[in-house]
Structure formats: structure tokens, C-alpha cells
Amino acid sequence: MATCDTVDTDTRQLRRISLASYVGSAIEFYDFFIYGTAAALVFPQVFFPELGHVMATTASLGAFASAFLARPVGAAVFGHFGDRIGRKHVLVITLMLMGIATVGVGLIPSTASIGIAAPLLLIGLRLVQGFAVGGEWAGAALMSTEHAPEGRRGFFSMFTQLGLGTALVLSNFVFLVVHAAFGGSGSAFYQWGWRIPFLFSAVLIGTALYIRLKVKESPEFTDQEPVPHEGTPFAELIRAQGRQVLLAGGAAICAPMLVFQAGTFFTHFAAEHMGYSMNLVLLVSMIGGVFATVFAAVTAILSDTYGRRRVALCSFALAAPWSLLVFPLVESRDHVVFAAAIMVTYALIGACIGPMAAFLPEIFAARYRYTGAALSHTMGAIVGGALPPVLSPMLIVDYGGWAVAAMMGGLGVISLVCVVALPETAGRSLTARATRRGSSVTASRTSR
């Protein structure tokens, strides 16, 4: 009877952790997506009205990209404390910081009201958001992966990745409703209507915080033997698995590149240059979120049967050439082709991210796993998520659309090559090593 009660308790706890990871991830991506959508469609007029069209767009997307500057700092700081004091405490802090920053953006007066202080506040809050996000994804992924039973880590880590598609649907739906309610792009929409999606984030943050406070600490953290630390988790990580950090970071480039190109640059380009209505652009992205959710679930589950590396290889082998083709399709000026291109893009994004919430944590030893997963994920996000949306408008002006396609295709190939170079991780034990030397040597050997 006691055994049954224990099993029931463990099952309830695992479900609660999966829900907490899912909700936290959804909020993280929701915050980024509403900011990316606003940066493409609203912020050039609200915060950079005196710049020319191209420069205003570049400045707006640059402010969007500024968060990525703070992400590696957040990854190092929260990774350090996540490996030292536990995953749960860090996740509560990152969630609160994200919520404060996102709601704060929705409260900033326009440049017309307070001058240059407005874009400076925008960038400042964006840096806070990036700092928090640097530690959010890795912690959520670790909580799911480290609590999951062996053989089902792909399934339970899936819930962290489902947050992306959910956030796409929710963020685009909220913007679509607000935009339609204000009768298009009228003055009321630009004055305060666009703020509603940001303020709505407070409701999501409160819900996620309530759930997250009720989960237990990861057993992989609590079961570690209390051995003396020699240096920081970052230093141990670089000494033992520096090569794996670089390869994992490279593998993490393609998905955020496609996510933020589709969610920011393509959104702006389709509305401003292709003449598509904002409602169409938002609706297509919302449907794309459904595709991303479905394909993330499928590949995450398949990775338990066929292996993380094999499933990821199949996904990236499709995503890499598609990265080269998608922008010419967006430029086609055909509504149906545009819609199909965006939906296929999000389907491939889902396929790529599905195995990654289990794949990246499994690469690293428990003593510095939070730091390793956070840094590698952040490296991919910076190269793939920050640079392409900022560089794309300038590449089009100077060289034409082919340069954007070449840049995207090149980044897709980098991720494919890095996945090829990484080892299979499915089926490995996540049990913490007893000593630093044993941990480092074992991790280094098994990662080859």
C-alpha cells in the first residue's frame, strides 16, 4: 500500500513538474514573441519615430537583440547558482525577473512623451529580460529531464519545448485581437493598444509562479554527494567538456534563427514590403505555432525510441536546406506561398527543438549541467536569434534578398554539422558522479 502511495505521489509530482516547465517555457517565449512582434510592427513608430524607415526598423530590432547581450551573463550567473543552490530556487527568481521586465515594457511612455528616455528604458528592461531568460530554459529543461524515469526523458522534457508553440499561438492571438479591436493601425493602437499583450503577461507570470513554488527540487541535485568544489561550475565545465559546449551551442543555432526570422524580420517584411495585412501575418504565425507544437511533441517522443541524435539529424537535415529556400518564398508576393512557407518553417522549428530539451542536458555531467545547458542554449540563441533579424534589413538594402537566404542557409548548415559531431545521449544514466575527477573524466570519455 505504501508503495502504491509513493508511486502515486511521484506521478503527481512529475505531472506538476511537467506543467511547471511547460508554463514557464510558454511565458519565456511569449515574452520574447510579443516583444519581437511589437519590435517589427509597432516600436519603430513609438520609440524611433524620427529615424528613417530602414534605420527605425534596424534600431527597433537592435533593441530586440539587446536582450541577447545579457543572456550569456544570465546563463553564467543562474547556471552557477543552479548548480550550487538548486534548480527550483533559480527558476523562481528568473520567472519573477521576466515578469517585471515584460510588464515594465508595457508601461513605458512613448518617445513623443518623454524623449530619449523612452528607448533607453526599453533597452534597459530588455536587458533585464535577457538576463533572466539566460537561466530560464535550462532550468526548466533540467527539472523535467532530471525527474523523468529512464527511457522517458524525451517525453517528459517535451513539455518544456511545447511552450514555444503555445507562446506563438497565444502571442499572435492576443496581438490579432488587440489589433482588430482597435480597427487596425489607428492612433489608439499605437498609443496604448499594443501595451495590452505586455500587461497580460502579469496574469501568466502569477499562474506559473504559483505552480513552480509547489514543485520539489531535482533529485539529480539533491542526491549529489557533498564533495568539495574545485573552482566554479563554469571552470569545471570548460576544463572537462569545453568542446561539447561549443558543439551543443552550434546545434542550438538553427531553431532560434528560424524562430526569430519568422517572428520578427519576416513579420516586418511581409507587412511593410509585401503589402500583406497585419491580420494575415499574425494569423499565419498563430497557425504556425500549432504546427510547431505538434512536431515538437512528435520528435521528442520519437527520441526516446530512436535516440536524440538520430531524430535531431533527420530534423536538421530538412531544416538546413529549408533555411536557404524560405526567404525567396516569402518574397514571392503570393499570399498562399507566404502562408505555406511560414507554416513549414514553424513545423521544422518544432521538429528541431523536440529532442533538444533532453539532448542538451544529457550531454553534461550533473555537477555543472545547469551551466552547460544554459551556456550552450544561449550561444545558439545569440548567433541564431539576435544577429539575423538585425542584419537582414541591411543585407537586403546592400545586396538583396539572396544575401539573407545565404546567411540563413549557412547557419542551418552549422547546426547540422554540430549535431553530426555530437554523441548519442539517449539511454545514458544522469546519476551524479561521486567526485569531481570521476565526473570530469567520465563525462569527457562518454561524450566522445
Image (cartoon, grey):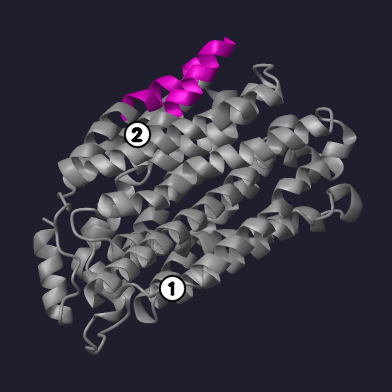
Amino acid carrying label 1: it is: Lys
The stretch of residues the image draws in magenta is 320-345
- Magenta segment, prevailing SS (helix, strand or loop): helix
Q: CA distance from mark 1 to mark 2?
A: 33 Å
Percent across and percent down for residue 5 are 30, 72
Q: Is residue 410 above or below residue 246?
A: above
Q: Residue at x 48, y 38 (%)?
A: 259
Single out the mark in the foreground, 1 or 2.
1
In the rendering, which numbered label is found on residue 88?
A: 1
- For residue 344, side relative to residue 49 (left or right): left
Q: Quadrant of the rendered structure where residue 173 is? A: top right
Is residue 328 within the magenta segment? Answer: yes
Q: Residue at x 30, y 80 (%)?
A: 222
In the rendering, which numbered label is found on residue 412?
A: 2
Q: Quadrant of the rendered structure where residue 300 is? A: top left
Q: Work out whether residue 428 or residue 60 is closer to the camera in this orientation and state it.
A: 428
Q: Label 2: few (<14), some or many (≥20) within 10 Å? A: many
Amino acid carrying label 2: it is: Gly
For mark 2, give the secondary structure. Answer: helix
Q: Label 1: few (<14), some or many (≥20) within 10 Å? A: many
Is residue 396 within the magenta segment? Answer: no
For mark 1, give the secondary structure. Answer: helix
- For residue 42, side relative to residue 318 (left or right): right
Inspect this view and state whether residue 337 appears.
yes
